[in-house]
Amino acid sequence: MFPAQPKCKYVQKYLYGKAIVADIGCGVGIETDFIQSLGAFVVGVDIDFDLLKIAKNHLPNENTQLLAGDAHHLPFREKAFCVVVMFDVLEHLNDPLQVLTHISIILKDEGILILGVPNKYTFGETLQTITSPFRSANEKQALVECSSC
C-alpha cells in the first residue's frame, strides 16, 4: 500500500496511455512513487538535494526522473506534460502566480494541474490570500468562483 494513495486519489482518472507527469515539490518521492505505479512516467522536481537523494534510493529508474530545481524556474519545454501535480507546495512559494502561470505553459492543451494545500482553507481562499497584493477585489472574486468549479 502506498501512503500517498489518499492524496493522489484524483490523479488516476487523468492518466491516459503512457502519461508524462510532473511532480513539482516531490520531496522524498512518495507521491511520485504512487503515480509511477499507475503506469505514468513521472518527472519529480524538488529544490532540496537531501530529499532528492532519499527519493533516488527508492524510486524505480525506468519510470521516474528526478531533477533538482526551483518551481519558479522549471526547465521544461512548452506542452511537455499531461498532468502536473503539486502537493503541499503552493503555500511555500515566493511567487505562486509565476509558478502557476509557468505550469499552464508546460501543460499540454488538454493537460490538468492537480493541487493540494495542507491547511484548513479551500484552494479558492488560498489563491485569494496569495494574490491579494496583486489583484483587485473583482479579480479575486472571479478567481475564487473559478476555483470552485
Image (spheres, grey):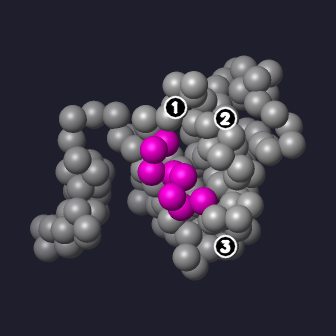
Helix, strand or loop for disc 2: helix
Q: Residues within 10 Å of mark 1 (few under 14, many from 20)?
A: some
Q: Residues within 10 Å of mark 3 (few under 14, many from 20)?
A: some
Tell me the quadrant of the picture where the N terminus can be found.
Answer: top right
Q: Which residue is drawn at 62% across and 37% down?
A: 34
Distance of label 3 from label 2 (alpha carbons): 23 Å
Distance of label 1 from label 3 (alpha carbons): 26 Å
Q: Which of marks 1 and 2 is nearer the N terminus?
A: 1
Q: What stretch is highlighted in magenta?
A: 8-15
In the image, is 64 to the left or to the right of 104?
right
Q: Indicate which label's residue lies in the foreground, 3 or 2.
A: 2
Which residue was labeled with disc 3? 79
Q: Which residue lies furthest to the right in this view?
A: 62
Which residue was labeled with disc 2? 33
The answer to which image quadrant residue 109 occupies is bottom right
**At which x and y percent is residue 146?**
25, 70
Which residue was labeled with disc 1? 4
The answer to which image quadrant residue 68 occupies is top right
